[in-house]
């Protein structure tokens, strides 16, 4: 029997990507709102708010155990709820980042608006959200484990993964800032040529 091969060819992906951006944006905004509400109940024994990021990226092991000792059981439950909601939040956020990067890449590629070097970087950088997504999952899993049974090795591993996650996110954002500045410079240079080019 001959093999059956299927090929999906999208002639105009712009509208599909825009729909994906819109849908994932609504998704992470909605779940993000629920996370904000749950985060209000993550407090210490005196009723002071404790940021979930303070749990995920503590200064050291002692700071984590001190924060944990000041939390009530209800507060720990709220923290776990916030982290579990984050698992639902991640697909919408990181897919939205990927859709936006893919949309911009296709537009630039179609218009030949940037150089090959920038285009190569854009092709690579648009997959970076998936790495950040994996690190975010690992971070949440380690945090949930540390909330139940904190240990020095576990907390240090959680801190390392958290820092790595934020670094990959910073690289993604930094690339877009540099690309935006460079593209703006090209536009200004094109519309307002220097005296030497007149």
Image (tube, rainbow, N blue to C red):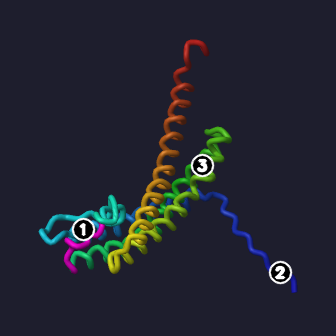
| Precedes in sequence: disc 3 or disc 2 | 2
Q: Overall secondary structure of the magenta stretch?
A: helix
Which span of residues is magenta-colored? 64-73
Q: Is residue 32 left or right of residue 49?
A: right
Say few, some or many: other residues with alpha carbon within 10 Å of mark 1 (under 14 / 14 to 19 / 20 or more). few
Query: What percent of the width, then of the height, locates residue 130?
Result: 54, 63
Q: Which residue is mark 2?
A: 3
Asked if residue 44 is among those painted magenta in the image, a careful observer would answer no
Q: Which tag is nearer the camera, tag 3 or tag 2?
A: 3
Q: Quadrant of residue 117?
A: top right
Query: What percent of the width, then of the height, locates residue 156?
Result: 41, 65
Q: Secondary structure at mark 2?
A: loop
Q: Nearer the viewer, residue 110 or 179?
A: 179
Location of residue 61 with respect to 1 vertically, above or below: above
Q: Which residue is rendered at x = 32% and y = 76% of the image?
A: 147
Q: Which residue is mark 3?
A: 122
């Amino acid at each position: 029997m001959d093999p059956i091969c299927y090929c999906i060819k999208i002639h105009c992906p712009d509208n599909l990507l825009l729909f994906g951006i819109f849908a994932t944006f609504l998704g992470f905004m909605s779940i993000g709102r629920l996370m904000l509400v749950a985060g209000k109940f993550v407090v210490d024994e005196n009723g002071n708010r404790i940021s979930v990021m303070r749990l995920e990226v503590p200064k050291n092991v002692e700071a984590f155990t001190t924060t944990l000792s000041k939390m009530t059981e209800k507060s720990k439950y709220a923290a776990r709820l916030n982290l579990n909601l984050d698992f639902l939040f991640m697909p919408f956020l990181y897919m939205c980042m990927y859709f936006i990067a893919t949309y911009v890449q296709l537009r630039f590629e179609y218009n030949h608006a940037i150089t090959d070097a920038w285009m190569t970087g854009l092709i690579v950088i648009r997959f970076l959200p998936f790495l950040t997504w994996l690190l975010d999952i690992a971070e949440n899993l380690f945090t949930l484990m540390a909330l139940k049974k904190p240990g020095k090795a576990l907390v240090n591993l959680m801190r390392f993964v958290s820092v790595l996650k934020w670094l990959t996110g910073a690289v993604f954002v930094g690339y877009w800032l540099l690309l935006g500045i460079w593209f703006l410079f090209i536009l200004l240079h094109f519309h307002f040529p220097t005296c030497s080019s007149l």
